[in-house]
Amino acid sequence: MSEEVNAAAARDERPVKVEVRHLTKYFDTLHVLDDVSFDIKKGEFVCVVGPTGCGKTTFLNLLTKIYEPSEGTLKIDGELADPKKHNLAFVFQEPSSFPWLTVEENLKFGLKVKKLPADVIEQRVERIIKLLGLEEFRNVYPASLSTSTEQRVIIGRAFAMEPDLLLMDEPYGQMDIKMRFYLEDEVLRLWREIGTTVVFITHNVEEAVYLSEKILILTNKPAKIKEELVNTLPYPRNIASKDFIDLRRHVTEQIKWW
Amino acid sequence: MAANKVILQIRNLKKSFSGKNGEVLAVNDVSFDVYDNEFLVLLGPGQCGKTVMLNMIAGLIEPDEGEIILNGKPVRGHDPKIGMVLQRTALMPWKTVMSNVEIGPKWRGVGKAERQAYCQKFIDLVGLTGFEKSFPAQLSGGMKQRVGIARAYANDPEILIMDEPFGALDAQTRYAMEEEVARIWDQQKRTVIFVTNNIEEACFLGDRIILFSNRPATIKEIYPNEMARPRDMISEEFMKLRTSISDNTDLAIDTL
Amino acid sequence: MVKVNKKGKKGEFKETTPLDVVYFILPFISLGLVVFLWYSVSTNKPDMFPSMTATWARLVKLFKQPIMRVPYYGHILASLKRVVMALAAAIVIGVPFGTMLGWNRKLDCFFGSIFNIIRPIPPLAWIPLIIIAFGIGEFPKVLIVFIGAVMPIVINTRAGLRSVDQLYLDVGTLFDANRRQILMEVAIPSAMPAIIAGIKTATSTGWMVVLAAEMLSAKSGVGFLVTRGMDANDMPLVLVAMITIGIVGALLGVLTSLIERLLCPWLQIK
């Protein structure tokens, strides 16, 4: 399978957006991340899976530049990543909207901080509200939303920023299957419409196979890339199809985390 | 299911609460039977009133209407034969693992040496040997829930209710704990009533799955599940059951 | 079978950042500034504010030459003794009383309103009444401190018992605890952090009240040193007493934190 997949990767002619080379992190003597190198193409949807405690969080914090790597570089558009220059957006497992702002004000918040012109803000927020179908919730405060709807607002807020790189850390970790399927389709819709480059960290292999164009499978600590897997299944994907299940089984085997 | 002997009968349970906008019906006319030594899963969306139902069975709140019949006798208040593992673990942070596990026998007045020897068995069973003197704050989420399970077993209930015990755990720990619970249930046969909103978890654990509707909780369907254990979450059989249940549930999306 | 989270046990791996160095240095800078301020004020207005050397000399003299036949440390001990006695009484009476109010709704209703009226009266306002009733001996001073110390203990204990998580009470029901077991083994331990917070407040309140009480009528104690310095126009003595009050008060804070550590070991984890 992998040859076919690599050929498909070669055919992908999008420019490289994020270039990670030899990323390594030690905390004192604890070796967390070991010589990780990979590329993310512009507009690509990459999922990262790996055993718990394998250093996924450290990996994410290196990408967001919360930590400085011990060795290695992270480049965005050919330049060393710099949170002041590059536009990075995050979505975490727990929704983090501002309780004193309405849904619409929450969506506008980051754009206002960026001091974008009012008409651009208006236009982007309207687009997100429409894509998410949140018209009726526009003037509602987060306290009266369920966790899943609040998380949708947060995801919308992140996409509205049109970031260079959007990092999502298990955003659907606590949702039931039905809701997860719904939100997965929604995030794919946003991604396709807006063309954002996404790194999506998850524990859920089914989710990774359903969403991604590429899956990075990490090993146990110190985390290395065990496999970089290009996922060429055509969208929309059928979770019950043989190809899907084969791929899911393969990834699960690769992780063997419990 | 082995003997199909009914141990617990739930009959026409009904409960409503007074909320801001008047009476809210949480549980509406729910009746079902629980068989001896079965692993019964109650499955329902987020706030469907499952917890209210459990709290009535455990005797923490009183039903407005209906009856709970244990071994042919109606239950009033809390019956010591019914134990419970709570979602928020509810371990006492000021007690060590051993002191938490032994509260049942201790409060019944069992002597220290005897009860600690007895509780040690269950601490070993859940794989926490060596952590007897640790405080809950020193344990990970999964380990805390193991203590909760040991504590419930150490009180020697006939029926063990588990209220979304893994709701707050991360995915991997959750998978590991699901296997643990299946293993423990296999070794220490008890009747288990396990509540969850996770379809995968329900299919993995249950001998039978009772699917509830959104609030007020009413029974939508009962699924027998005779898949061989240990179960494979990627098998065709598993996916089929999961899909058929998933198609039958309501998407809990907000509306105004 | 169980994976132990090594990270949590051995402590986080934290790098020493330049900011950590700044955090370490800042307290010394502020202390230095105070010393400098003291120095410049006392040089400019020597008659109003004693110099550091004069204050130091007064301290040395105080060690050699007792006031009212009580040595320096004797005055500290005298104040501490009053606080400790009052505090002990406040704990012995305040904790059970607060527990009663927090646990029993009827008792809370019965005592609540009286307590709420007495509470805002500052301990020092009691002084005239207490002097009429008990004179100016040792007991009235301890009583005044007691009044100051018992209030936060009762208030915190009551609040602690009121806010016991229903979840823990449910566990009591589920494991068939009787009412006494629920109170002793669930409610009181769960309220312990609040109770100890009350004792901490009581200690610092007590220390402030004892000094005020001593300034009014006493022949020993650090508060007495302040009055004595004022009466004798001995400003260096006033400063020595003030600094003593500050340091002893801070040490008392450390001591109560240590006691908390001892009584609530589960709070020290993390």
Image (cartoon, rainbow, N blue to C red):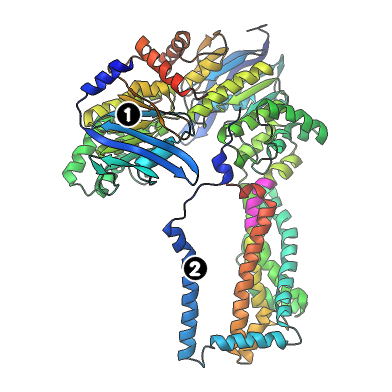
State the residue in front, C268 or C193: C268
* Amino acid bearing label 1: Val
Residue neighbourhood size for the residue with mark 1, other residues' Cα within 10 Å, grouped as few (<14), some (14–19), many (≥20): many
Q: Quadrant of residue A242?
A: top left
- On screen, B197 above or below A242? below
Tell whether B66 sits left or right of A127.
right
Tell whether B256 sits left or right of C210.
left
Residue B7 visible in the displayed image: yes
Subunit under mark 1 = A
Q: Residue at x 72, y 81 (%)?
A: C220
The residue tagged 1 is A46
Residue A241 visible in the displayed image: no
- In the rendered image, the quadrant that contains the N terminus of chain B is top right
Give the CA distance from mark 1 to mark 2. 48 Å
- Find residue C26 and report its horizontal and vertical position in percent: 46, 67
Q: Are marks 1 and 2 on the same chain?
A: no
State the residue in front, B208 or B71: B208
Q: Residue at x 63, y 81 (%)?
A: C241
Circle on res. C166: none
Residue C51 within the magenta-colored segment of the rendering: no
* Amino acid bearing label 2: Pro
Q: Mark 1 falls on what kind of element?
A: strand
- Find residue B10 and report its horizontal and vertical position in percent: 62, 16
The residue tagged 2 is C27
- In the rendered image, the quadrant that contains the C terminus of chain B is top left
Tell whether A37 sits left or right of C3.
left
| Dominant secondary structure of the residues highlighted in magenta in the image | helix
Q: Quadrant of residue A103?
A: top left
- Find residue B153 and report its horizontal and vertical position in percent: 69, 25
Residue C196 within the magenta-colored segment of the rendering: yes
- In magenta, the rendered stretch is C189-197
